[in-house]
Image (tube, rainbow, N blue to C red):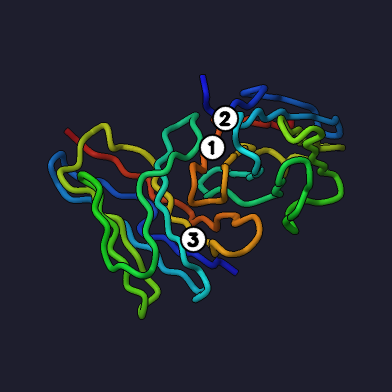
């Protein structure tokens, strides 16, 4: 499978716990994006990496959120002290030259905070 | 501030009919307008995209009509099929900015009845 892979597919956690999601982009893609999608809404941009450098962060990315892409390959998104409002689908996308070149989304990680 | 407004929220079309979804944008700097299709449990997948230098783009049964002066664009699905039943998102971005995160509309849930 050469698509964007996200794990886990589903995560249920108790409020206040920390969670970490992983995204494996298409291997030749050097750009990686995280989005959040709540029910009935379109995806909202969270953050962007070019290789290992985090170049852009949305205001939605509060200080409880942190993303890394340590070797310019896979990326992790961690949410600390989860809140019920964090319940959403977290989507990862990757591309080789920006949004108009092979911009591919993964199937997402569905987070439920109880 | 919602930069991309999409309508209708939901749409029911008979098999063989034409499905039309509309979007309006605010930022005149946007220069790339894709449409994404999303099935339940999956990430969005690129359907068709247009740049503002053309007024229409057709790919198979899918056509984007673009009106730069009105800051509007629409997706037309000809000969709609039950397999087209999904949620459709319009999006917009500026290609020449770093990162080029997509700004999505809220989505239209299309149901094609057989």
Around disc 3, counting alpha carbons within 10 Å, would you say few (fewer than 14), some (14 to 19), or many (20 or more)?
many
The residue carrying mark 3 is B92
Secondary structure category for the residue under label 2:
loop
- The alpha-carbon separation of the residues under discs 2 and 1 comes to 6 Å
Q: Mark 2 points at which residue?
A: A4
Q: Residue A111 sits in which quadrant?
A: top right
Q: Distance between the residues labelled 1 and 3?
A: 16 Å
Q: Which chain carries label 2?
A: A
Q: Residue A65 in the image: state x and y as whole percent.
A: 81, 43
Disc 1 crowd rating (10 Å Cα; few below 14, some 14-19, many 20+) is many
Q: Is mark 2 in CB contact (under 8 Å) with mark 1?
A: yes
Identify the residue position indicated by label 1 in the image: A105
- Residue at the spot x=60%, y=69% of the render? B1
Q: Left of B21 or right of it: where is B33? A: right
- Which residue is more in the foreground, A30 or A62? A30
Residue B30 in view of the camera: yes
Subunit of mark 3? B
Q: Which is nearer the eye, B12 or B63?
A: B63
Identity of the residue drawn at 18% across and 48% down = B78
Residue B20 in sight: no
Q: Position of residue B41 (x, y in %)?
A: 49, 29
Which label belongs to residue A30?
Answer: none
Residue at the (38%, 54%) spot, across then down? B49
Answer with mark 2 or mark 1, whichever residue precedes in sequence. 2
Q: Which chain carries label 1?
A: A
User: Where B114 falls versus B79 (above or below)?
Assistant: above
Dividing the picture into quarters, in which one does residue B14 lie? top left
Image coordinates of residue A110 in percent, x first then y, are 62, 30
| Depth order, front residue of A5/A72 | A72
Instruction: Same chain for labels 1 and 3? Say yes or no.
Output: no
Q: Do labels 2 and 3 share a chain?
A: no
């Amino acid at each position: 499978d050469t698509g964007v892979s996200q794990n886990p597919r589903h995560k249920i956690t108790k409020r206040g716990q920390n969670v970490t999601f992983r995204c494996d982009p298409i291997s030749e893609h050097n750009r990686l994006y995280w989005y959040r999608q709540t029910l009935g809404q379109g995806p909202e941009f969270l953050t962007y990496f070019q290789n290992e450098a985090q170049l852009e962060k949305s205001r939605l990315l509060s200080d409880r959120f942190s993303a890394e892409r340590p070797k310019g390959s896979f990326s992790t998104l961690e949410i600390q002290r989860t809140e019920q409002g964090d319940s959403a689908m977290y989507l990862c996308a990757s591309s080789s030259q920006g949004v108009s070149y092979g911009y591919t989304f993964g199937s997402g990680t569905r987070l439920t905070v109880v | 501030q919602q930069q991309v407004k999409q309508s209708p929220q939901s749409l029911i079309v008979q098999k063989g009919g034409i499905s039309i979804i509309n979007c309006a944008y605010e930022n005149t700097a946007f220069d790339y307008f894709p449409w994404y299709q999303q099935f339940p449990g999956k990430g969005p997948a690129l359907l068709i995209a247009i740049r503002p230098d053309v007024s229409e783009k057709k790919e198979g049964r899918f056509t984007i009509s673009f009106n730069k002066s009105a800051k509007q664009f629409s997706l037309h699905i000809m000969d709609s099929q039950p397999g087209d039943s999904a949620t459709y998102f319009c999006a917009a971005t500026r290609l020449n900015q770093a990162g080029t995160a997509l700004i999505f509309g809220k989505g239209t849930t299309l149901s094609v009845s057989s």
